[in-house]
Amino acid sequence: MTDSNAAQPIDRLLNAAEGPFVCNSARRLGRVLAQRQIDTRIVIAGGSGFLGTLLADHFAAQGVEVVILTRSPKARRGRVREAHWDGETVGDWAKELQGARALTNLAGISVNCRYHARNRKFMLDSRLDSTRVLGEAIVRCANPPPVWLNSSTATIYKHTFGPAWDEAGEIGGCAEAKDIFSVYIATEWERVFNEACAPGTRRVALRSAMVLGHGRNSVLPNVLRLARLGLGGSLAGGQQFVSWIHQEDFCRATEWILDHQDLSGPLNLAAPNPVTNAEFMAAVRKVCHAPFGLPASRWMLEAGAFVLRTETELLIKSRRVAPGKLLANGFVFRHPHLLPAIEHLVAQGAQSALPPCQS
């Protein structure tokens, strides 16, 4: 809907008013209100997965119009609708960016796979192509979105057992963590994002940690099942750090970033208290009232990853990340500690897709 089209019904109503001054002034006010209505629209590219669904539901609950760009659009009800895009070329979907309040890009195929040549190409291209084409669409907009949030990952930081990395932390991969390719994807992703020509649009790279939530693509339902089966022990020694964030704080922080115009560049989306893998699994066992959990050595993880067609890097890399910019600018986490965060999610799970734990 364009600015002029939105104002037409208001114009027809006000033309009946007495006096040209009253009519013209009220018409201008109507156009301003129509433009403000348009400015509440949020576009989420690649928003059909776990994180996109979280954000769409979060904003729609506040009465915000949400447009999801997806390769397989479906009919939706309420404030959310879907539009087709291929993530590679500028098409009709680009008109959704005109006058939008914000653009958030979550596009990219899952990294939960084996990193052979074909999958590596898909993982890299799906992120770089979608980011590049969004930049091309923005530069063509007469009224581009004032802010563009683009996914990145906390995996970009160097494998560490030392102090947590904030946004100035060291970037790089290492053979020990088997993360060299993942760090390469992350750095290339941010490079393309930073090189996009969007001078009127504030840009933030969301270096997100693992999001704990109810969705089928969240890690939490899987570790809860392992704990109930007695397999919730530490992994590969359990000393590697796990950075995480509750799904509610993920949505709240995303909205907070949109509203704080002084924030730009890379930003860590992570709770302020990362834990070791041993502590993480102990919290899961406690919530599930599991008396024990069998640990898994690194060779066991390698064998299991081969069978499940995934990579051990997702489990063995030590990700110790601090939300430096969020804390420095006054964001307050509702779920800063892991155990209460999991307890909260499991309590919600009684009415959601999250598998309940035995009491």
Image: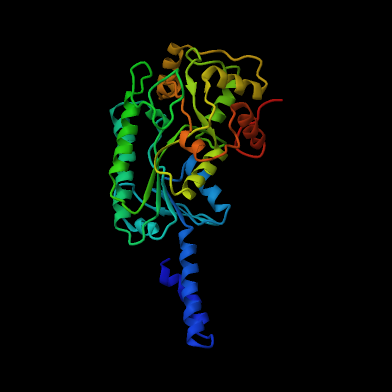
Q: In this picture, is 324 found above or below 305?
A: below
Q: Is residue 241 left or right of residue 265?
A: right
Q: Residue furthest right?
A: 359
In this view of the protein, which residue sits in the foreground, 55 or 194?
194
Position of the N terminus by quadrant: bottom left
Q: In this picture, is 320 found above or below 107?
A: above
Residue 22: percent from left, percent from top: 51, 83
Position of the C terminus by quadrant: top right
Q: In this picture, is 77 found above or below 239?
A: below
Q: In this picture, is 115 found above or below 16?
A: above
Q: Residue furthest bottom?
A: 18
Residue 324: percent from left, percent from top: 47, 33
In this view of the protein, which residue sits in the foreground, 260 or 301?
260
At x 59%, y 15%, the residue is 293
Residue 292 visible: yes
At x 53%, y 40%, the residue is 330
In this view of the protein, which residue sits in the foreground, 333 or 132?
333
Q: Which image quadrant is residue 97 in? A: bottom left
At x 56%, y 22%, the residue is 280
Residue 228 visible: no
Q: Identify the image's colour scheme: rainbow, by chain, secondary structure or one colour.
A: rainbow
In this view of the protein, which residue sits in the foreground, 97 or 25?
25
